[in-house]
Amino acid sequence: MPITVRRAEYTRPADRAAIVELLSLYAQEPTGGSEPLTAEVQQTLVDRLAATPHGFVLLAEQEARIVGLVTCFQVFSTFAARPLVNLHDVVVHPSVRGQGVGWLLLEAVEAEARRRGCCGLTLEVFGDNEVAKRLYRKFGFAGAESCQPPHAMLFWKKRLG
């Protein structure tokens, strides 16, 4: 079953519901903080994302079912004097983990960043999230490792040229 990645359409009911559902699932996992999204966040999330000028969400879809997402924000690198993209959330539905959805989302973000003339990609990852760290390393992200507590947030980046 092929997986495709596309930009979320904030006015489309299925996309709106999937964004809230996937981020709610992620928020309740240990890597997401183990807390459900509040009712207010669930009700306002998509409209507030839509109102964020340099933000975008990409969705991974398999047979008309949205199985993954990445929320991104274009920011600016003062050291490169060029924009870059920060990956804020990378979420893959538990039923399809290990099937390459995360990789496809990362490829799509990189393609969009290159299209925008960005100098790189950045993200934060919990120090004890070994599955995510393995994916990010394989994709080309790197970050400083140190003797931080296991739940410390690590800042990683990938240069695009």
Image: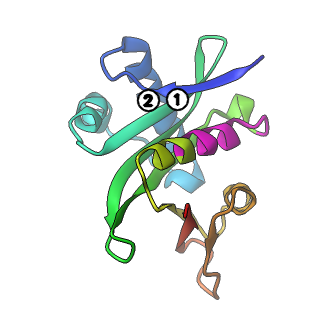
Q: Are marks 2 and 1 in contact (CB under 8 Å)?
A: yes
Assess disc 2: are there few (<14), some (14-19) or many (≥20) residues with their C-alpha within 10 Å of its C-alpha: many
Assess disc 1: are there few (<14), some (14-19) or many (≥20) residues with their C-alpha within 10 Å of its C-alpha: many
Q: Is residue 28 above or below residue 150?
A: above
What predominant SS class does the magenta segment belong to?
helix
Q: Is residue 32 above or below residue 157?
A: above
Going by the image, does 94 lie left or right of 68? right
Highlighted magenta segment, given as a residue range: 98-109
Q: Is residue 45 above or below residue 154?
A: above
Amino acid type at mark 1 = Leu
Amino acid type at mark 2 = Ile
Q: Residue at x 57, y 39 (%)?
A: 108
Instruction: Name the one closer to the observer, 4 or 150.
Output: 4
- Can you tell which mark lies on residue 19? 2
The residue at which mark 1 appears reads as 59
Asked whether residue 139 is drawn in magenta, I would say: no
Residue 80: image location, x then y, percent? 39, 72
Residue 140: image location, x then y, percent? 68, 62
